[in-house]
Amino acid sequence: MPPTAPSPDVQPAAPGAAGRDSLLKRYMLPVGLCDEPSGDIFLAHAMRRRNLDRLRRWMPHYARVHGLLALLMLGLCGTAEASQVSGWLVAAAAVPTAGEVVLAAVFGCMATVLHLGHD
């Protein structure tokens, strides 16, 4: 059977679109940072050490990024409240702000634990 051409209504993705999305995801969250252990116990131990080294290196970055975003969003909510914007809009902005504050706290605690638990 001969290969068929793609239908005209299906548009191919831009060449760098997937790369930008994954780069943004990598910059914002520790997705795909660690490798899954496999092999014998020595290889698994070496992979665990490499994963801990990566986490020690990148967790302070994630804590700073989300701390800055949390501060910006808290400032935005404070400014909106001070300028007497509708309460519904302030409440809608408070939800992602709370998420950023939680992420900043979690990543900050993880960075501290990884720093203090260094061998």
Image (tube, rainbow, N blue to C red):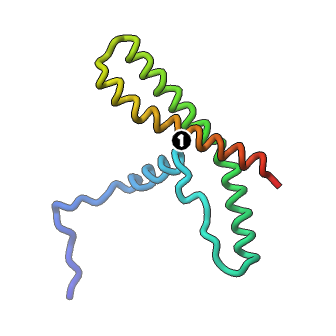
Q: Position of residue 70 (x, y in %)?
A: 51, 31
- Secondary structure found at label 1: helix
| Quadrant housing the C terminus | bottom right
Query: Would you say 8 lies left or right of 117 here?
Result: left
Which residue in the rendered view is the most extreme toward the top? 83
Which residue in the rendered view is the most extreme toward the right? 119
Q: Where 87 sits versus 42, above or below?
A: above
Query: Would you say 80 lies left or right of 63 here?
Result: left
Query: Would you say 102 lies left or right of 63 here?
Result: left
Q: How many marks?
A: 1
Q: Which residue is mark 1?
A: 103
Name the residue rendered at 70%, 58% in the picture. Answer: 52
Q: Position of residue 19 (x, y in %)?
A: 45, 54
Image quadrant in which you'd find residue 8: bottom left
Q: Position of residue 89 (x, y in %)?
A: 31, 25
* Amino acid type of the residue tagged 1 in the rendering: Leu
Q: Position of residue 73 (x, y in %)?
A: 46, 27
Few, some or many residues within 10 Å of mark 1 (<14, 14–19, 20+): many
Name the residue rendered at 72%, 75% in the picture. Answer: 43
Q: Where 81 sits versus 49, above or below?
A: above
Name the residue rendered at 56%, 52% in the picture. Answer: 30
Name the residue rendered at 72%, 49% in the picture. Answer: 114
